[in-house]
Amino acid sequence: MWHTDIPSPAELRTLATLRAPGVVSIYLPTTPVSTDDRDPLTLRNLVDEAITRLRESETLDNAGVLEVEEELYDLVDDGMFWTYQGHGLAIFVTPERRTVYRLPLEVQERVYVSDRAFLKPLVSVLSHSSTCYVLALSENGVRLVEVSSDLAPTTTAVPELPKDAASAVGKSSIKDRSHRGRLVGSEGKRVHLRAYARQVDAALRPVLSGSDVPLVLAAVEPIRSIFRSVSSYPHLADAVIETSPDRLTDQQLAEDARGVLDGIFTTRMQDLAELFDARRSEGRAVTDIADAARAATAGAVETLVVDRSATFLGSVADDGTVAFDDGTDDGTAFGVVDEIVRRVLLTGGDVLSVDAALVPGGQPLAAILRWAP
C-alpha cells in the first residue's frame, strides 16, 4: 500500500481553524526508496531552524518551546516512521498537537512560524491527483494496481477477489451455451458477468473503504458498463482505460492511468475557466485580491484558484480589509493569499493551487462567488 496520508476536506478545514501562538509548519521532500539518513537529517536541520525562529519570536514561553521541540525531535528520531515514506512531508506542530502528512508529490523545503498553519503548499499537492487505483477487469481475470507519482506500480492483494468470471459463478466457462441450465447465450453471459462484477465490488469494498483516491477502470464492453452499474465506490473515475487489460503490464496500466488523471485535471480546469467567465458576466467572479479577501471573509467564495507561486505579504483584517507589506518573506509574516485560502476553506469553499497559466482571468487568483457582492 502507499505510504502516504492525504488529508480529507474535513481535516484540511480543521487545520484552517488552527489559531495559536507559535504554530510551526514544515515542508520537505522525501524519498520513498531511500535507506539512508538523508531525510531525517534534512528534517533535523529544518527543526533547528524552526526552534530558532520560535525562540526569536517570543510567542511561546520556554515550556511551550520545549514541548514543540520534543514533538519535532521525536519525529526525527522515529526510525519506524522513516521506513515508510512518500515524496514529501507536511508537518504542523503546536505545544498541544502534532499533525503529519506523508505526501504523494515532492514539496519545496519550507519552515514557517506563525499563529496559524501554512496551507498553500498542501493545497497545491491536493489540487492535482497523482495517485489512483487501476482496476484491470476482464472475463479472464481481475487485479487492483496502485499508481503513485513516479513510483513503480504494484498489484495489491485483495482478499476474496474472484479469479475470473467463470470461477465467480461456479462454471467452467460463462460462454457455455448448453440448454441444461436456464441461462444461455448472450443474456445468460451478462447475468454471469453481473454476478462476477458484484463479487469484485464486494471484495474491493473493505480495501477502498474510507479512501478518496480515484479508481480508474481498465476494461472493455460489456464488463465495463456492467461493473460501472454495480460499483459502490464513490470515486470511480468517469474516464476509463478503453482496452483489455489481459496483456497489459502494471507499468503500461500506470502510464495509461496517469494520462487519465491528467485528462481529469485538464477537464476540471477547462470547466472552471468556463464557469469563471459565466460568473464574471453575472458579477459573481473576481480577480482583485482585495475583493477576494472581502468575499472570502463574508463566506461568499465558492471556488478559489490561486497561483501556487504567488506571494503577497500583508494582513487581512477581520472585516476583510487588506493591508499589504513591502517587507521580505522571512517565514514569519503570513501572506495575504494564504489568509484568503484559509478563510475560503473555513467557509466550506473549494481551493485549488495551480500553475499561474491555469488561473482563470490571468491574475494571481480567481474567485468564483456564491452570490454577487
Image (cartoon, helix red, strand yellow):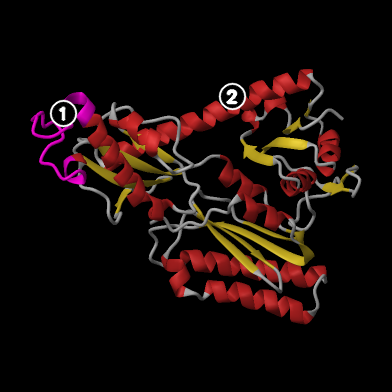
Bounds of the magenta segment: 166-188
* 45, above or below 170, in the image: below
Identity of the residue drawn at 38% across and 30% down: 240
Whether the residues at callouts 2 and 1 have beta carbons within 8 Å, the answer is no
- Left or right, 190 with reference to 302: left
Instruction: Provide residue 64's location: percent of width, then percent of height.
Output: 75, 77
> From the viewer's perspective, is residue 320 above or below residue 26?
above
Residue 211 visible to the viewer: yes
Pick the front one: 228 or 293? 228
Q: Does dot 1 land on a helix, a strand or a loop?
A: loop
Q: What amino acid is found at the position of numbered circle 1 in the picture?
A: Val
Read off the residue under disc 2. Answer: 270
Horizontal relation, residue 268 to residue 288: left or right: left
Q: Which image quarter is the N terminus in?
A: bottom left
Q: Counting other residues with Cα less than 10 Å from the Cα at mark 2, is it few (<14), some (14-19), or many (20 or more)? A: some
Q: Is residue 162 placed above or below 189 in the rendered structure?
A: below
Q: CA distance from mark 2 to mark 1?
A: 47 Å
Residue 184's label in the rendered image is: 1
Q: Quadrant of residue 90?
A: bottom right
Picture residue at 49% right of the left edge, 54% below the top:
210
**Residue drawn at 38 percent across, 65 percent down:** 35
Q: Which mark is in front, 2 or 1?
A: 1
Position of the C terminus by quadrant? top right
Tell me residue 12's x, y (percent): 65, 53
Compare marks 2 and 1 and give the one earlier in the sequence.
Answer: 1
Residue 287, given in percent of the width and then of the height, sits at 78, 29
